[in-house]
Amino acid sequence: FLKSHGDVDNLGYPRTPVLADPMMGGQTVQYFQRMILEWHPKNPPAYRIQRRLLGDILYPESEPPLPATSAPPTPYTYFPFTPGKITGLGHFVANQTRSGPMIYFKDYFDSHGGVGAFGYPKEEPVMRNGLWTQRFQAAVLEYHPDFDVDGNLPGTNIPYRTYRVQLELLGDKYIERNRLPYQ
């Protein structure tokens, strides 16, 4: 799961070994900086490792759904809300905000696992603490303009732009909120 979903760039570094989770009745899990992975042995093989919906746990509110006609100006994916069915929540993921700034969330979402990794978007992009963010069921995407520049990270061949979109450290936030002893 780690290798196919963006490795440590996406999940962050492990905060625990695989363990019985004291918060979820002994569920087998592993905590990472940005996510918590759960083991579900009774699921079909492709679904035995699941990400905990930390976006829903830490940010339970969701913005009201938008109509498909309110699309942002760049390529986007819309996840319609259909009452009574397992569908999206009526929001878009796009590379540009409605007000114009480029944020590249769709590129990141599509290349790092999409709905399977992040869940559905719960809102449209919002400016928080000086960064464009968008909350999803299992993650929060952040646009870091300081990495949206030409060149490579010092001493590497890694382009700065590799890190222009990052995930909020929801695993660490969950650990802190629940006063767990993991670091």
Image (spheres, grey):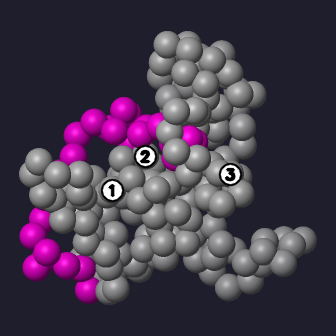
Q: Is residue 59 magenta?
A: yes
Give whichever of discs 1 and 3 has the lower sequence position: 3
Residue 26 x %, y %: 56, 15
- Disc 1 target residue: 120
Tag 1 secondary structure: loop
The amino acid on which the numbered mark 2 sits, given as a three-letter code, is: Ala
Quadrant where the image shows the C terminus: top right
Could you say which quadrant of the image residue 65 lies in?
Answer: bottom left
Q: Residues within 10 Å of mark 2 (few under 14, many from 20)?
A: many
SS at circle 3? loop
What residue does disc 3 label?
2
Q: Position of residue 30 (x, y in %)?
A: 65, 32
Magenta region includes residue 148: no
The answer to whether 91 appears left or right of 5 in the picture is left
**Which residue sits at x=46%, y=64%?**
114
Specify the quadrant of the image occupied by residue 49. Answer: top right
The residue located at (12%, 58%) in the rendering is: 82
Cα separation between marks 1 and 3? 20 Å
- Write down the residue under mark 2: 138
Q: Residue at x 84, y 78 (%)?
A: 157
> What are the residue bounds of the magenta stretch?
47-73
The image position of residue 12, as x and y in percent, is 66, 47
The numbered mark, 2 or 3, whose residue comes first in the sequence reads 3
Image: 15 above or below 155: above
In the depicted view, which residue is nearer to us: 58 or 146? 58
* Callout 2: SS: loop
Left or right of 36 on screen, residue 152:
right
The amino acid beneath tag 3 is: Leu
Q: Determine contact: label 1, label 3, CB under 8 Å.
A: no
